Image (tube, coloured by chain):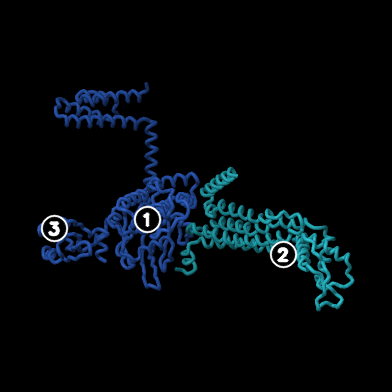
Amino acid sequence: MSASSQIDVEAERVRRTIAEDVQAGSSELVEFSQQYARNSKHKNAALAIKVGASNIEDPAIADSLRGRMTGILEDILVDRARQDPSVSERLQARERLYARFRKEASKQETICRLDEITKRFKRSGFVLGPVSFDFRAGEITALTGENAHGKTTLLRLVVGEYRASSGSVTFPALAPGPRFYWSRVKEHIGYLAQKLPDWTGALEDTLYFHAAMRGLSPPESETQVQYLVARLDLAEHITKRWDELSGGYQLRFALAEALVGKPRLLVLDEPLANLDPKAQAALLWDLRNLAKSASNPMAVLISSQVLNRLEAISDNVIHLRKGQVAYRGPTGEIGSGRTSNTYECDTPLSQGVLMERIGAYVQDVRHNGVYYIITTPRAVSYRDMLQLLMNADVPFTHFRDIGRKAMGLFEQD
Amino acid sequence: MRAYIAILAAFMRRLGRWLLLREPMLWRAQPPRWLVLVSLAVIVIAAIPLMLTSIKVPAEVDDLTLDTVTIRTLLRYGVAIALFNWIGSIVGKPVGELAPRRHISTVVAVAIGSFVWLALPSVLTYPQINAIKRLGPNDQELSANLEAVSRYDRWGCVPPDVDADEIEKLRNVLAYYTGAAPDLKKEQAVSSCKSKDFFSLTASGAFYSARKVIETIWEARGFGTNGKNQFYDIWSKPYWWLAFALGLGILTAILSYPTYVWRRTFLRR
């Protein structure tokens, strides 16, 4: 019997004894640790447990000790495996690979750079920008703003559907230099327009078609399409016609098309509009994982009105107000320079009654059609406001601090 | 027959899959469905005149010529409709903004496909022309027959010295080329004849038919070398067709570009 097999047999014996009898198990663990542990801390831990394990009556404590002893036993085995030359080489190779992935993922290459970009529409007089921003690999940027405030225009500038009136769009990671061919850059861009074009022919064929168009070999195409079909839960609908699909599934297929070929920049215009809450959460979670993938980190630019969910996964936010950038920066820094706090509150009280009860302590109370928006001095914290509402006997079913959320940016509009 | 159809269908499926994974732009043109099936349809339709006619006697030349010319014309309209739908189906599969070189396969596929479709109806009239030119006597006799039926202003004004032997000879010629022996009788000539002694012959319609058959056989024998005739346009200006087919290919590639590319490039919007 080889040395490693001998250890495994011994370890199994100790495990069984620990499960049957704590005190006997602690003794065997000490013997095992003395014989096999390569780190003295494991030997000491086994000894300490043996001392503490004498005369234990309480079954809960016994169970706890069993857990700790099993942990020490497994640690001894892992420690030995790590020092085994063959195991250690594999572990080191894996560590090197992970380190490489982490390094690549952390490079945060700038995939797309907007430099003082503007777009003027002569007929309507609408002007977008100037907007400057770097879209980096592994980061999700949420594009927010009211309807007709320039979100889609900005997305279409990024994907080359519009020419900027001034400023520039460049793709440092895809095409170094100020001059580039859109056709080449677009091989690395996945774009999901707000209005999805109808697909013709078999859905599966269309996915394979786009995979092949992005230069994937036949086996790669097979792998990627099957992966996306499984991941986006499309298998059940793959044999249907486009017009037989629900809006949600049409969107998923379009997303699969945008993702096939592993794009470096993914641009999504209102992708959550046709999805139920569960599907929204699943999609955003998938986007987060895809964007931060170690092997192929993507820059994701996504516009949506589903702010809470979008905010939860995005690293940056660009908020547009009448074509101008009202905020751009990390999601966590929204409202960092605010001079007042803004809270959202749902209460059956009328505005007059609410003002009567809390008006002396707040700057402003107004109704946005759904909730009351309460503005207070910066010094009034969330907890203070909550206490104030309870003290003032204000019944409420919803209360949220939106001063540091994207929603708060809308309330400033 | 079922086995052949099954084999053809399986072959086309496999070819389609192969193209889809390896030559997606070519797959977009759906060559198995369009090029193979439409070409087969054109071949079958173009062969109809030969299937309808046994073409063993000159009397059938007229019908065969009419069928050949009519079906060729109809096929051209059919091909035009097929081309329109084919190009529509290609353009209807959006590919986004691609480098021009990636559209070369579309240009080539559409150019070849449309040239083949345009040429097939004409190419497939060759068997008909060959069948026609094999009919009738040798060139010398055919020429003499043509002269006989063409003489004297189509026999509306027959000189008085034309005797019964010659009229009998003429009757035989007409019978050979029209399939029916007309009863040729002397009648009073029309007033426009050179002399009052002239007379005319009945069954002048037979003269016209016989002359047309002889001319058709003559033209079929001289096809390609004998200048302009009713078969002339079969191979007239093939280079123009090639240019037209190439133009269609380029047009398809141009239409494959999203409109925003043109707007961005030319209108700078």
Q: Name the residue rendered at 24%, 25% in the picture.
A: A29
Assign a secondary structure to mark 3: loop
CA distance separating discs 3 and 1: 39 Å
| Cα distance in 3D space between marks 2 and 1 | 59 Å
Q: Kindly identify the amino acid type of the residue bearing the numbered disc 1.
A: Gly
Q: Nearer the viewer, residue A331 or B155?
A: B155
In the rendered image, the quadrant that contains the C terminus of chain A is bottom left
Instruction: State the residue at coordinates (39%, 63%).
Output: A115
Using the rendered view, name the quadrant where residue B123 is placed: bottom right
Quadrant holding the N terminus of chain A: top left
- Marked residue chain, label 3: A
State the blue chain.
Answer: A
Return the residue at label 1: A247
**Gap between marks 3 and 2, in whole Å?**
97 Å
Labels 3 and 1 touching (C-beta < 8 A)? no
Q: Nearer the viewer, mark 3 or mark 2?
A: 2
Q: What is the chain letter for disc 2?
A: B
| Residue identifier under label 2 | B230
Residue identified by numbered label 3: A395
Q: Residue at x 12, y 65 (%)?
A: A353
Chain B hue?
cyan
Identity, as a three-letter code, of the amino acid under mark 3: Pro
